[in-house]
Structure formats: structure tokens, C-alpha cells
Image: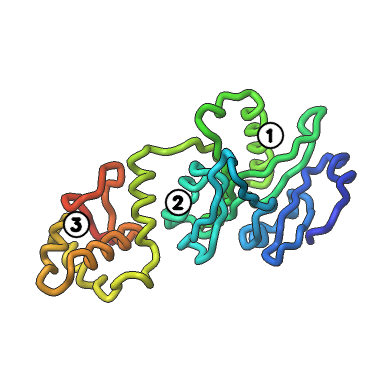
């Protein structure tokens, strides 16, 4: 069971301590070994977000289709990683700034708030730190990575340091995310689109086969949603267009 602890206990304890914020906003402190992943995944960012004129980072909120709720981000790079997580069918939970962990690292006490916590459909937990490529070689950043990786290994979690992905892939996923909400689309066309996609192997081909019955923009919107949801697949390393080859995922 989670318990509250004083700052003095966190500093002196040899056991890594974690602070996280529940869905109702209350802070909870506990040992890393006793951390309830389900509460963290359903909770709020452990630190408050502030927006002010002239700030260096681009912060905001993203509505994740995986969760049906908002996820906070502190930079465009973090947003890109969240988009990829939301697009990944194996990811079932996404938590931003999920907790602060404190504990000994040699003779010092280190404190760190990871950027993301991802829970996968098979139960695997991945903790993610997002850093700009220029910072990935900073000795202080590397030391923080090494310490966090060791703590994650202790819990049986995966640990990922992320500084970006292939530009074409990220931009395509960002574009498809605009079609992630089925309630805004003519989803009654989905069956016809899938039937057409089994015969006509490009986005433009599907539109042409349904042109007499359905507006092309409505058909394309459904195609793009089905690509987002994984019902259709395409090579997302290449620019999306009417000539993009698509296939129905069995």
C-alpha cells in the first residue's frame, strides 16, 4: 500500500522513493518497489504545467485516442513521442510526467521526473525520457539515463531514451492523428472502403471505385482513419497521396 513519507526520509533512505499524483490530484509517496502502475497510468502529471510569455518550450495538451482523454506535453519533441505511442496498437496507457523518483546514486541523492510512462497490452511497462539530439551526449544527461535505467530494470520495466524518429514517419503519423476521432467522420462508409481496398490497392483507387456513391473527401477521411487505427496499412516512411499503396490488415 502506498504511504506518505517526509522529505527527510526520501533523502536518507537507500530505497528509491516515488511521488505521483492520483486522478483526484492528491500526491502519494511510496517505495519504488510498491508503486502501483495502474494508479500512475490513471493519474495526473506529478508536476504542474505553467504557460507564460516567452517560455522556451512549447507545452500543451493532446487528446489521445488510446485513452479518450488529454495527455500533457512540454515540448514538440515530447508531443511527437506521444503521437507515436497513441498510434501504436500495443500501447494501452500513456502517462506524462508520471512520477518523481528520488534515491541514492553513489554519494549523491538524485531526483528525476521521466517524461512518459507507457503500458503495453502484454503488461510491459516502458519509461521514456525525451531529449533533443544535442543533449544526448551531455555527461550529466547520460548519468541520469544510466541511473534511471538501473531503477527501471529493478522493477522489470523497459527504459527508452528518445531523441526523435524518421521525419517522414512522424509527419505522417501527425497527419493521420487529425483523423483519429471516428465520431467526426462518416464511419458508415467503413465497410465499403474496406471492400474497395481489397480490390483497389491505392487511396486514389478506393476513392475512384466509390465515386458514384460517396464524396471523395468523405471516403479519404475514412481511409485515413483506418490507417490511423491499423485496420489499413501503408508505408508511412513515404509521403501519403492518392497513389499510396494500402492493404487491409488481416
CB under 8 Å between discs 1 and 3:
no
Horizontal and vertical percent position of residue 241: 21, 50
Horizontal and vertical percent position of residue 167: 36, 38
Q: Is residue 204 left or right of residue 131?
A: left
Which element is circle 1 on? helix
Residue positioned 63% across, 37% down in the render: 149
| Alpha carbon separation for disc pair 1 and 2 | 27 Å
Residue 201's quadrant in the figure? Answer: bottom left
Q: The C terminus lies in which quarter of the figure?
A: bottom left
Residue 95's quadrant in the figure? Answer: bottom right
- Residue 96, visible in the rendered structure: yes
Q: Of tags 1 and 2, which is closer to the observer?
A: 2
Horizontal and vertical percent position of residue 145: 63, 33
Q: Is residue 78 left or right of residue 37?
A: left
| Alpha carbon separation for disc pair 1 and 3 | 47 Å
Residue positioned 74% across, 39% down in the render: 111
Q: Specify which label sits upstream in the sequence, 2 or 3.
A: 2
Residue identifier under label 3: 203
Looking at the image, residue 65 lies above or below residue 133: below
Res 83 label: 2
| Alpha carbon separation for disc pair 2 and 3 | 23 Å
Res 93 label: none
Horizontal and vertical percent position of residue 94: 55, 55
Which element is circle 3 on? helix
Res 147 label: 1
Residue positioned 36% across, 70% down in the render: 184
Q: The N terminus lies in which quarter of the figure?
A: bottom right
Amino acid at each position: 500500500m502506498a504511504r506518505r513519507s517526509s522529505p527527510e526520509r526520501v533523502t536518507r533512505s537507500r530505497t528509491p522513493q516515488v511521488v505521483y499524483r492520483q486522478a483526484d490530484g492528491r500526491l502519494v509517496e511510496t517505495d519504488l518497489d510498491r508503486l502501483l502502475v495502474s494508479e500512475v497510468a490513471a493519474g495526473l502529471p506529478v508536476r504542474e504545467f505553467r504557460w507564460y510569455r516567452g517560455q522556451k518550450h512549447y507545452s500543451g495538451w493532446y487528446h489521445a485516442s488510446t485513452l479518450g482523454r488529454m495527455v500533457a506535453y512540454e515540448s514538440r519533441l515530447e508531443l511527437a513521442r506521444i503521437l507515436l505511442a497513441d498510434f501504436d496498437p500495443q500501447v494501452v496507457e500513456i502517462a506524462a510526467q508520471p512520477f518523481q523518483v528520488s534515491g541514492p546514486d553513489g554519494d549523491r541523492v538524485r531526483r528525476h521526473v521521466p517524461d512518459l510512462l507507457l503500458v503495453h497490452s502484454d503488461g510491459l511497462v516502458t519509461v521514456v525520457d525525451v531529449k533533443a539530439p544535442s543533449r544526448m551526449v551531455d555527461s550529466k544527461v547520460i548519468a541520469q539515463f544510466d541511473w534511471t535505467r538501473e531503477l527501471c530494470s529493478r522493477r522489470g520495466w523497459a527504459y527508452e531514451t528518445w531523441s526523435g524518429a524518421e521525419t517522414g514517419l512522424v509527419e505522417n503519423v501527425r497527419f493521420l492523428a487529425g483523423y483519429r476521432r471516428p465520431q467526426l467522420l462518416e464511419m458508415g462508409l467503413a465497410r465499403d472502403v474496406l471492400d474497395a481496398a481489397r480490390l483497389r490497392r491505392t487511396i486514389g483507387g478506393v476513392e475512384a471505385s466509390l465515386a458514384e456513391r460517396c464524396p471523395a473527401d468523405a471516403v479519404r477521411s475514412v481511409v485515413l482513419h483506418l490507417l490511423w487505427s491499423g485496420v489499413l496499412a501503408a508505408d508511412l516512411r513515404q509521403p501519403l497521396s492518392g497513389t499510396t499503396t494500402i492493404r487491409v490488415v488481416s
